[in-house]
């Protein structure tokens, strides 16, 4: 194998390549490099957002391709790359190099040999220091990195699917994450996901970037035993790690010898050797394009909720910008649910210096006490308190809307809001989410036995009402399932005011919204599913996360 050339965008990188490989040509243009007749394989190690462009250029030039993970940051791009490689009859390998590790591959060998019986559980964990910035800080630019889940957790999703391949491909994934990056909740330093496989097998993928050094663990259990593998180093690319593998056969624990040193720097070298063997000797690829697509798909499943939040924040921002430009003022109804858009929205307002002095925000609803007063703002479930903490208080004071432009329906005089809207020219856009029973705001569907036509329901104004048990039950998920913590009453903007808005922009970002979204879009327009009345509006858009759009899985779990 001979390294014939490099292509790098920055002069600094090109100079480094020249110093390290003085006998190689260094190009500033990727297309010049891949056009060379003496090159057979191209290895792409660019920032994630450039993978599709570079992969397409290499394949169009007739080169076999080794593409670092993630192979792309959208499934459409993954499919495009796979199809192009297939049409060109070229090899496409994706850089899931952990499959080549003497340690992690040994785990796979032992699982396939039946050393733990039928695998039932896998834990893949990483405890490490923060990510490097990367060239031009691309790794901290969400538009370029796609998601931090696409950085290292993607390797662990791949390992989970690889280790549990005997039970079938993953059928669902659920995840939680949190950020340590001020103003960037989309960059998840702490991340955990549970991947369900056919039957009762499952895997847990978890990592934190708030730790120190680099410590990775894999644990598997099956019907006959268990495996525990560990790797530790001062950093991810150390050449002097410590590592071990232990096997439990149901009676005894035995340490399994690992024949050669392992770590990222060694596996990256092995990856190149694998590619040469594949081209020269038709040897198998460790991870194919289809494997790479699976890993991206699992990452995007769990990264989709932040995508919805970003879309909602961007839509709110553009709506305000357009309205201020065209009419000098804006009136919006806004929800608390979805919620993740507000820190992003506040950050964008501050960064772009957009004044909200002529914008009125009408809160969609608020919980009440049993005697129909607002719950205190300090209550952890107060919508007013949430908006203050996550939106209004984060705004530059010179840009924030004045207090009188932050309207909350008054439970003592709900009609005041209806009159205010009429007196001030109506609502420009109503933003919101959809409840498990199809409610918009807290406009609950009629109770069993209660008759209500679509027209009657659409005319219901801003009012105080008792919350349905379904609403209180699903909202209790955020308080550990303790339904009695969730208030029984609320004040809500009415269907009358919502449907009278000039535009409706609603969002579904929760897995449990899969069925109700279908009822909204495809079921009968009826009071029994309040959000179905969106279909009577002449400017209504419903945006859903990809996992919400998928067909719901029916079964016990």
Image (spheres, rainbow, N blue to C red):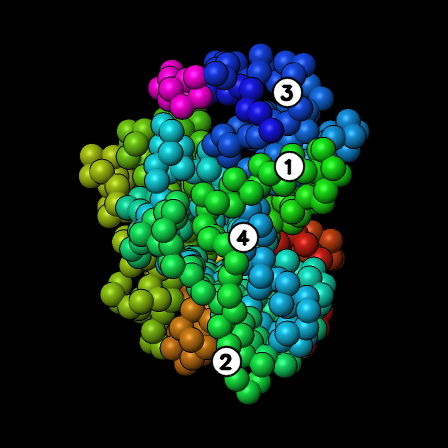
On screen, residue 157 versus residue 370, left or right, reads right
Give the residue drawn at x 42%, y 75%.
Answer: 480
Question: Which comes before the other along the chain, label 1 or label 3?
Answer: 3
Question: Which residues make up the magenta segment?
Answer: 9-22
Query: Mark 4 touching mark 2, by CB under 8 A?
Result: no
Q: Is 126 one of the magenta-colored residues?
A: no
Residue marked by disc 4: 101
Q: Give how far apart the Cα atoms at labels 4 and 1 are.
A: 15 Å
Separation of marks 4 and 2 at Cα, in angstroms: 22 Å
175 in relation to 307, above or below: below
Name the element at disc 2.
strand
State the mark number for residue 67.
none
The residue shown at (35%, 66%) is: 381
State the residue position of label 1: 275
Q: Residue at x 67, y 77 (%)?
A: 117
Could you tell me residue 119's position as x and y percent? 64, 72
Residue under label 3, please give it.
39
In the rendered image, residue 12 lying in the magenta stretch gets the answer yes
Report how far apart the C-alphas of labels 4 and 3 lie in the structure.
27 Å
Which residue is label 2 attached to? 253
Q: Decide which of 310, 204 is in the foreground and name it.
A: 204
């Amino acid at each position: 194998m001979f390294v014939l050339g490099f292509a790098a965008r920055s002069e600094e990188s090109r100079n480094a390549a020249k110093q390290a490989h003085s006998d190689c040509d260094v190009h500033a243009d990727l297309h010049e490099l891949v056009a060379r007749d003496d090159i057979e394989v191209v290895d792409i190690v660019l920032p994630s957002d450039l993978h599709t462009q570079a992969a397409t250029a290499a394949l169009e030039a007739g080169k076999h391709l080794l593409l670092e993970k993630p192979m792309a940051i959208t499934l459409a791009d993954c499919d495009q790359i796979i199809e192009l490689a297939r049409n060109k009859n070229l090899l496409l390998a994706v850089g899931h190099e952990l499959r080549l590790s003497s340690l992690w591959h040994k785990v796979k060998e032992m699982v396939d040999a039946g050393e733990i019986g039928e695998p039932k559980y896998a834990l893949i964990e990483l405890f490490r220091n923060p990510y490097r910035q990367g060239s031009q800080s691309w790794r901290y630019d969400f538009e370029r990195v796609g998601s931090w889940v696409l950085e290292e957790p993607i390797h662990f999703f791949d390992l989970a699917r690889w280790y549990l391949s005997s039970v079938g491909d993953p059928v669902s994934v659920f995840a939680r994450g949190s950020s340590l990056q001020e103003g960037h909740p989309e960059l998840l330093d702490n991340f955990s996901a549970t991947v369900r496989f056919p039957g009762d097998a499952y895997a847990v993928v978890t990592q934190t970037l708030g730790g120190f050094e680099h410590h990775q663990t894999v644990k598997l259990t099956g019907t006959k035993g268990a495996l525990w593998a560990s790797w530790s180093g001062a950093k991810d690319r150390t050449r002097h790690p410590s590592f071990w593998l232990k096997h439990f056969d149901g009676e005894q624990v035995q340490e399994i010898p690992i024949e050669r040193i392992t770590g990222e720097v060694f596996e990256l070298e092995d990856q190149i050797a694998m590619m040469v063997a594949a081209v020269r000797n038709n040897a198998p690829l460790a991870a194919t394009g289809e494997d790479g697509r699976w890993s991206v798909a699992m990452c995007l499943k769990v990264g989709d909720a932040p995508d919805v939040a970003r879309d909602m924040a961007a839509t709110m921002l553009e709506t305000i910008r357009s309205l201020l430009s065209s009419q000098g003022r804006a009136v919006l109804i806004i929800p608390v649910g979805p919620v993740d858009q507000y820190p992003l929205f506040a950050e964008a307002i501050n960064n772009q210096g957009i004044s909200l002095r002529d914008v009125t925000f009408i809160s969609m609803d608020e919980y009440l006490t049993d005697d129909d007063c607002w719950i205190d703002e300090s209550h952890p479930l107060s919508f007013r308190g949430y908006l203050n903490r996550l939106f209004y208080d984060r705004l530059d004071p010179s840009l924030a809307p004045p207090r009188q432009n932050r309207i909350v329906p008054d439970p003592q005089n709900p009609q005041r809001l209806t009159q205010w809207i009429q007196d001030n020219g109506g609502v420009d856009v109503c933003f919101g989410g959809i409840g498990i029973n199809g409610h918009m705001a807290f406009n609950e569907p009629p109770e069993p036995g209660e008759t209500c036509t679509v027209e009657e329901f659409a005319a219901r104004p801003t009012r105080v009402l008792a919350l349905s048990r379904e609403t209180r039950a699903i909202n209790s998920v955020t308080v550990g399932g303790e339904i009695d913590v969730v208030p029984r009453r609320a004040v809500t903007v009415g269907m009358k005011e919502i449907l009278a808005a000039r535009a409706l922009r609603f969002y579904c970002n929760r897995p449990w919204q899969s069925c109700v979204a279908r009822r909204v879009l495809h079921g009968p327009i009826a009071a029994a599913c309040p959000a179905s009345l969106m279909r009577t509006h002449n400017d209504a858009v419903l945006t859903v996360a990809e996992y919400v759009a998928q067909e719901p899985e029916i079964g016990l779990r």
